[in-house]
Image (spheres, grey):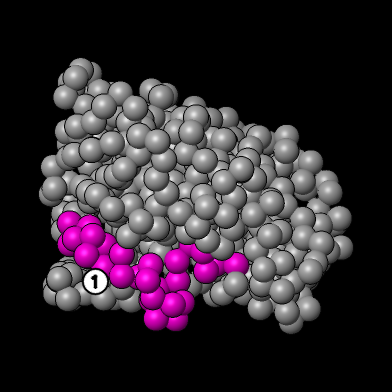
Amino acid sequence: MSSKILWADDEIDQLKAHIIFLEEKGFEVKPVSNGEDAVTLIKKNTYDIVFLDEQMPGMDGLATLNKIKTAQPSLPVVMITKSEEESIMDEAIGGKISDYLIKPVNPNQILLTTKRILDRKRIRNEKSAQSYLQSFNDISSNISKQTGWEEWIQIYRQLSQWDIDLEDGDEGLRQVLMDQYQQANNTFGKFIEQEYPYWLDDEPGERPVLSPDIIPEYVLPHVEEGNKTVFIVIDCMRYDQWLKFEHQLGNFFSIETDFYYSILPTATPYSRNAIFAGMFPSEIASTYSDMWQMKGSENSLNQHEEDFFNAQLKREGYDINAKYEKVLRSEEGSTLLDRISNYLQVPLSAFVYNYLDTLVHSRSDSDVLKELAPDVPAFRSLSETWFEHSTLLQIFQVLAEQGATVVVTTDHGSVRAMRDTKVFGDRETSTNLRYKFGRNLNAEQDAAIIVREPEKFKLPTADRVNNFIFAKEDYYFVYPTNYHKYQNRYKDTFQHGGASLEEMILPVATLTPK
């Protein structure tokens, strides 16, 4: 199929030779003499590239550009101008043009520009494919029983970046990547099952940074230095999503991204409380038995994060007036944005943003969201679109303008659950799909980490709770009763709570205003 070019120029009749040249090269060219006609055609038809004269009577090139970008934001536009004034070029580039040419232009200039822009994606995909295939063996050779926790971080970083680089590439190559992800998660689950309990007995510095270490390790040193410090936890954020957010934040901040491991279960009532309390779940349960009990709804376990936060600060020797806010709805984000200056009057503030976690759970129940985000790249793109238009991005911008140091992390990630595995338990067993607690739970050993002694995992016990199970890889738990009903209902949903690279290896970034 030939590529379609729209060319708008008030002197289009004088460009017939150029148009014939392009048509002989296999392009389909639609000429128009004004901006109004160009915008009308773009709203009704599909074009691959637009050549746009900057100086046209009536709606000039820059005004036309704005309307084109409103109608088709990703459509490549090449501005053609007689002027070399820097202000015009700045204005055009600010309008997201793909290139600009100075009149007079010759047919070969137009041809080369067209090919370069239209072939850019293909060339980039081909180069990414070649690079990935070259690194495939290196990644695979690093995936073994001997792989250490630092190496697992590097493997996950590489796989996440390739997932983004290949997201528009050949489906066959993406399947190779997905198979390598599965190989990595298979071995990673065994690694966590073996090594995780030993980490909990080690002192910080002798093991990877875990959830309870985040505030002392990454936040308090900035408070100690006297910086205005803001700690932001974006609930349920994966590393690949952070890479997209980081790209937008790079305009305002210098960013240094590190990594830590979430505790198990990788679920908000446990992992986020561990961050704000600076304790493991069993320690929280024994220290704050009046506020944190495994009875009733698990949502009730997240009502005291601010209390845990202030108690941790005092325990660490910081007698300061810290602020804490949790954003669950868009209007709360707007209120926080309006009052952001107030939070910079104290040495430390903490914000929790719940949107991504809400998006994960909403997708599980919404056919519309599944259509909008049918796979990981689409889900990542949906997350990026939210962030681009969110009050959270506006808050980041204000914090940069005010000179605040910002530490950003998440409490856990999520994994696309594609395979079911049977779980056996009684009616009192918790309902989560990637982890469960109850009495005498059992599951297939290849698909789950079975914890018979919760104290070794620093997990609390309670009435009718004497063991936990955690799903590995991309498994989700289904009871034998009504097996097929729940198998179909929960397949291809994003879940968290278990032991996978995506859920456990998490970014923690320090943002310094430029």
Q: Is residue 191 above or below residue 354?
A: below
Q: Residue at x 40, y 52 (%)?
A: 459
Say which amino acid is labelled 1.
Ser
Quarter-of-image position of residue 57: top right
Indicate whether 207 appears above or below 355: below
- Residue 285 picture location, percent across and down: 51, 50
Residue 192 percent location from the top left of the image: 26, 62
| Quarter where residue 82 is shown | bottom right
Q: Residue at point 22% right, 42% down?
A: 475
Q: Main secondary structure of the magenta part?
A: helix
Residue 201 magenta-drawn?
yes
Q: Is residue 256 visible to the viewer in this orientation of the structure? A: yes
- Between 494 and 214, the one lying in front of the other is 214
- Which span of residues is magenta-colored? 186-215
Residue 508 x, y percent position in the rendering: 52, 66
Mark 1, secondary structure of its residue: helix
Residue 131 against residue 420 in the figure, above or below: below
Q: Residues within 10 Å of mark 1 (few under 14, many from 20)?
A: few
Foreground residue among 419 and 309:
309
Residue 42 among magenta residues? no
The quarter of the picture where the C terminus appears is bottom right
Above or below 28: residue 458: below
Can residue 271 be seen by looking at this rendering?
Answer: no
What residue would you read off at disc 1?
A: 131
Q: Is residue 304 left or right of residue 367?
A: right
